[in-house]
Amino acid sequence: MTILMFEATDARVSSRDNTSQHVKGARLMDAISVLTDDHHKARGLFTAFRAASEADDAEQMGSVAEKIFEELDTHTAIEERVFYPALKEAGGSDLEELTDESNEEHHVVDVLMKELKEISPSDPAYPAKMTVLMENVEHHAGEEEKEMFPKVRNIFSETQLKELGLALHREKHVYRLENKSVDELHKEAAELEIAGRSELDREGLVSAILSEYDV
Ligand SMILES: [Fe+2]
Ligand SMILES: [Fe+2]
């Protein structure tokens, strides 16, 4: 039932604005598909960054890097908040070890992103640092796909994986909204035609927007 509600919401929201990218694709996707799709998206952006770097196009490097940071920030947040805790709770020592290692790898990526955000894409250190970041993420995502996800498939049922997929999808919205200013939240509430939005504070706006997406 919940999944059908998602499908209806998808059609309504995707006709409106750029928030559609956060909603599309959520329907009927299990947790592993949600996360693997994110990995593929990151790999695509890495290819675009390498092309911009080859062409010595600092402006394009900066613009692709911004998208990479946004994707990685969101992806690591939903894994840390939803996916890894669920694995730790359900799995044995094997999965616990893998999630602990993953959290540490996220930390390295986080440090690299912070350093990159402080320098200009035209700085000679920028592409070198980005290369280390991308190689780290490629290694980490490969390990998740080859080692962690097959173990997860063995432990969780299809239904559980779909429920987890929806929880990940919800957390993407929560994370996205957390990073918006109150003005931006008001703008989104207006786009969604939420009644009484002018009376709402930050918390009220977030909760009204989330319920518009049925998450
Ligand atoms: Fe991860
Ligand atoms: Fe991942």
Image (spheres, rainbow, N blue to C red):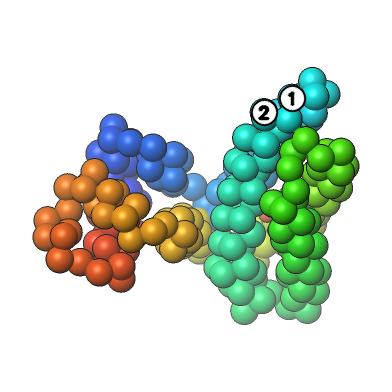
Badge 1 element: loop
In the drawing, does residue 79 fall left or right of residue 202?
A: right
Residue that carries the numbered disc 1 in the rendered image? 57
Compared to residue 164, the image places residue 47 above or below, namely: above
Locate residue 23, reporting x and y percent: 40, 45
Labelled pair 1, 2 in contact (Cβ < 8 Å): yes
> Would the CB of label 1 be found within 8 Å of ligand 2?
no
The residue drawn where x is 87% and y is 38% is 124
Quarter occupied by residue 46? top right
- Which quarter of the rendering shows the N terminus? bottom left
The residue drawn where x is 55% and y is 68% is 82
Quarter occupied by residue 205? bottom left
Whether residue 92 is visible here, answered yes or no, is yes
Q: Depth check: 141 or 145 in front? A: 141
Compared to residue 142, the image places residue 196 above or below, namely: below
In the drawing, does residue 28 fall left or right of residue 52?
A: left
Badge 2 element: helix
- Which quarter of the rendering shows the C terminus? bottom left
Residue that carries the numbered disc 2 in the rendered image? 60
**Distance in Å between CA atoms under marks 1 and 2:** 5 Å
The amino acid on which the numbered mark 2 sits, given as a three-letter code, is: Gln
